Image (cartoon, rainbow, N blue to C red):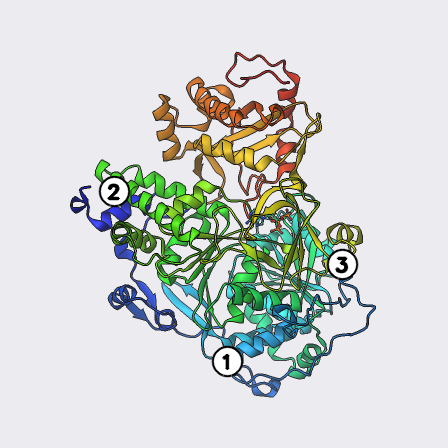
């Protein structure tokens, strides 16, 4: 190895950095750009020697208070800033006639408490959890956001007071008990405050996906009988204005960003709304808070509809507070030290649990990314904040991987060789560590220490993950290839598994309990049951615990489908445990393909295998339910429009290179789609043949496939907000192509048809 010729920073760049001006997920920011640090960020963190050295080079900025943080007027305040009212002691209805579930928003449920262990923790409301944090960490930073190039922060005391003011504002606007406050916008201080205020005021906090159409917004607002809608800007407001006449319970709309373009009755700016809140006596709010019980609903999470019409998942105070307690303990979050960057859609349970509740539970700080985070700016925010914990849905990790590979491929041969060497060392060292359940070897191998210094530390720094000890993925399946890629760079990405219906996490991987492709072990205090296991131990994963939801709002039948008569939540996912209780997801019953011949085929492993065998493929969807054989829709890796997020015709640089390697000069999807590029088609067929060779039966072989003209995307409607494939939508969109698979007579001579259907 010629390590001496390789300059470390350049090496890291070769492995990790984006091309200058590159379009896409992570935009380039040279190592020298890592200039921003935060006084409170650094003060709150345990820094290694190296980190401290880095920090001394950085400029410390003064953090000024939020301009909207005007003091709460004394006559309206029973609670002065900095003091926390003690809630009246709350007693749960102890009656035996309480059930474990309900489908009515105003009911109480029986909590799944146990006599000892984590599940015996006394239940508390959101208000109780919040005030406990304010008492302990009142002056600590709770929220941070950027104005121009200055970071501003809000401490826990002021955060709490602002939530109270907003809660009183909602009361003034006529929020009724158990009615929704819909929040439609990108992650921000106002989003959090509106969410918590809705809960304190006795309503339901309801996140609405910003990607929803006007009709989809209407569905949610109508379903939760929203009295108030909080929208980010004019664009989101337009959607609501289109449907407001069909929302009989709607009383007011609040726009929290941008000036109002027109005045309308019952449309308010954030400042006007907060002003209204200041006029309401505290006693009015405190009376409502005093009647709240942990076993009552306070939040609705709407499923994104990957398997059908969205359902309103009712979460109780206890669901939120207990899950935050149990998870923070399990993941060993450090009080008053954790920093997270909020960028995933807050209407999804994972983002809400991590960014709002877990962070509140431990007195951590949440910093808001820019709204164009997923279009490229996220890495800049990560580099400024240097979070201690980071959660990405699989697509986020995949995008990072693609970008890093594409840049790495352009570097010199020597650098590529060193990167490859370091990755080999990283993977083998980390796999051994995993087998030792996280224990470091008595003496770290020299080559690992060298690779760490030359490559791994630089990569982490370039990604803004240099002090992030908790890198997580969840919400959808991730490929082994992506997990191994990051493991080889000394970034173990731990998996979380759960559902909206389990208030987020059910199993978690930990540094000392981690297996590649496993979602980890069940959170202490919760239980997993594998229902009707087959001979290999595969069965439906069922959940038990205080994280299990109350029921679906106004959907008795769906609630009874999800929760069995003993109260177990049926996930609809297939999985099995290994001999050490690690859970592995092996499929989704919800999307199981049952062929005309009666064979049950989980599509994801086959789709993943194709993506792995043919790196040019961006998305793959297996077809075959009630059909005689399997077929597949494929899309090619292409550029994404940085404004709209829509897929473009130009291939990614990686895809162009892959084509060239096969002898093709295609640079656009349109040159490849529908069999236009025979060379590329032959290469894809070869990959599919390899996957077919490993199929466990003839029925599991892909017999026909087509490359579509356009990649799947959120704006296109094929992917949900957490990038999960919306199979029913794709089936409808490509009905014609799918029908063609089954119309044609199969001829084994064409590249698409290697084998005649059995
Ligand atoms: N780590 C994971 N690995 C594989 N699948 C996962 C993982 N985490 C979550 N999932 C999948 O996501 C599902 C939960 O989805 P979630 O409750 O977040 O709803 P959603 O994304 O809004 O979509 P839907 O409309 O399908 O309910 C799980 O049942 C499982 O299928």
Residue for point 53% across, 37% down? 712
| Label 3 crowd bin: few (<14), some (14–19), many (20+), radius 10 Å | few
Q: As drawn, is 347 to the left or to the right of 635?
A: right
The residue lying furthest to the left in this view is: 5
Number of the label disc, if any, that sits on residue 342: none
Which quarter of the rendering shows the N terminus?
Answer: top left
Q: Residue at x 72, y 64 (%)?
A: 179
Query: Foreground: 58 or 754?
Result: 754
Picture quadrant where residue 616 is located: top left
533 up-or-down from 296: above or below: above
Relative depth, front residue between 111 and 278: 111
- In the image, residue 174 sits, relative to residue 477, either above or below, namely below
**Residue 340 in picture, x, y percent from top left:** 45, 62
Q: Earlier in the sequence, mark 2 or mark 1?
A: 1
Few, some or many residues within 10 Å of mark 1 (<14, 14–19, 20+): some
Identify the residue under disc 2: 418
- Most foreground residue, 224 or 532: 532
Q: Which is more foreground, mark 2 or mark 1?
A: 2
The residue wearing badge 3 is: 248
Q: Which residue is mark 1?
A: 136
Q: In which quadrant is the C terminus drawn?
A: top right
| Location of residue 585 in the rendering, given as x and y in whole percent from the top left corner | 58, 45
Nearer the N terminus, badge 1 or badge 3?
1
């Amino acid at each position: 190895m010629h390590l001496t010729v390789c300059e470390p920073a350049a090496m890291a760049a070769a492995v990790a950095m984006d091309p200058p001006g590159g379009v896409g997920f992570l935009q380039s920011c040279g190592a020298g750009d890592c200039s921003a640090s935060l006084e409170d960020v650094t003060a709150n963190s345990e820094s290694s020697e190296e980190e401290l050295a880095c920090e001394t080079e950085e400029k410390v900025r003064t953090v000024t208070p939020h301009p909207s943080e005007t003091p709460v007027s004394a006559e309206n305040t029973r609670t002065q800033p900095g003091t926390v009212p003690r809630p009246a002691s709350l007693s749960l209805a102890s009656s035996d006639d309480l059930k474990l579930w309900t489908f009515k928003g105003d009911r109480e449920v029986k909590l799944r408490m146990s006599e000892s262990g984590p599940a015996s923790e006394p239940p508390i409301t959101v208000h109780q959890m919040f005030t406990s944090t304010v008492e302990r960490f009142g002056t600590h930073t709770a929220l941070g956001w950027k104005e121009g190039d200055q970071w501003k922060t809000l401490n826990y005391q002021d955060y709490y007071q602002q939530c109270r003011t907003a809660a009183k504002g909602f009361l003034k606007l006529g929020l009724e008990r158990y009615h929704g406050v819909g929040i439609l916008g990108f992650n921000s201080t106002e989003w959090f405050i509106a969410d918590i205020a809705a809960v304190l005021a006795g309503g339901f906090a309801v996140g609405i996906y910003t990607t929803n159409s006007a009709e989809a917004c209407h569905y949610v607002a109508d379903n939760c009988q929203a009295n108030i809608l909080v929208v980010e800007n004019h664009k989101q407001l337009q959607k609501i204005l289109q449907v407001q006449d069909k929302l009989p319970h709607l009383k007011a709309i609040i726009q929290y960003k941008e000036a109002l373009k027109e005045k309308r009755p019952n449309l308010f700016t954030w400042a006007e709304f907060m002003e209204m809140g200041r006029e309401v006596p505290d006693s009015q709010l405190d009376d409502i808070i005093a009647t709240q019980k942990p076993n009552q609903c306070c939040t609705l999470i709407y499923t994104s509809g990957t398997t059908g019409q969205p359902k309103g998942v009712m979460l109780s105070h206890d669901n939120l507070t207990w899950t935050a307690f149990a998870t923070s303990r399990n993941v060993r979050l450090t009080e008053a030290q954790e920093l997270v960057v909020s960028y995933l859609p807050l209407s999804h349970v994972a983002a809400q649990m991590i960014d709002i509740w877990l962070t509140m539970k431990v007195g951590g700080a949440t910093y808001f990314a820019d709204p164009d985070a997923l279009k490229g700016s996220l890495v800049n925010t990560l580099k400024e904040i240097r979070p201690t914990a980071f959660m990405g849905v699989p697509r986020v990790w995949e995008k990072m991987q693609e970008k890093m590979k594409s840049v790495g491929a352009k570097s010199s041969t020597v650098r590529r060789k060193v990167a490859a060497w370091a990755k080999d060392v990283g993977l083998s060292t980390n796999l051994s560590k995993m087998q030792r359940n996280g224990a470091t070897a008595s003496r770290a191998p020299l080559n690992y220490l060298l690779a760490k210094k030359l490559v791994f530390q630089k990569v982490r720094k370039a990604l803004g993950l240099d002090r992030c000890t908790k890198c997580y993925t969840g919400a959808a399946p991730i490929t082994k290839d992506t997990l191994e890629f990051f493991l080889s760079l000394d970034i173990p990405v731990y998996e979380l598994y759960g559902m909206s219906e389990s208030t987020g996490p059910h199993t978690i991987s930990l540094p000392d309990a981690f297996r590649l492709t496993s979602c980890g072990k069940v959170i202490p205090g919760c239980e997993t049951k594998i229902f009707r296991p087959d001979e290999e131990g595969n069965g439906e994963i069922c959940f038990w615990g205080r994280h299990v939801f109350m029921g679906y709002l106004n959907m008795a039948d769906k609630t009874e489908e999800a929760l069995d008569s003993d109260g177990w939540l049926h996930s609809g996912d297939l999985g099995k445990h290994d001999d050490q209780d690690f859970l592995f997801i092996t499929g989704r019953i919800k999307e199981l393909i049952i062929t005309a011949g009666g064979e049950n085929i989980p599509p994801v492993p086959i789709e993943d295998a194709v993506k792995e065998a043919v790196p040019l493929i961006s998305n793959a969807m297996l077809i075959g339910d009630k059909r005689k054989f399997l077929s597949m829709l494929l899309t090619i890796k292409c550029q994404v429009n940085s404004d709209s997020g829509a897929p473009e015709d130009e291939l990614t640089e990686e895809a162009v290179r892959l084509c060239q390697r096969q002898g093709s000069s295609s640079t656009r999807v349109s040159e490849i789609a529908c069999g236009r590029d025979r060379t590329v088609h032959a290469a894809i067929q070869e990959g599919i043949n390899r996957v077919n060779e490993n199929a466990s039966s003839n029925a599991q072989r892909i017999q026909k496939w087509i490359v579509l003209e356009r990649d799947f995307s959120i704006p296109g409607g094929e992917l949900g907000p957490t990038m999960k494939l919306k199979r029913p939508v794709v089936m409808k969109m490509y009905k014609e192509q799918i029908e063609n698979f089954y119309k044609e007579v199969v001829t084994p001579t064409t590249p698409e048809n290697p084998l005649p259907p059995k």
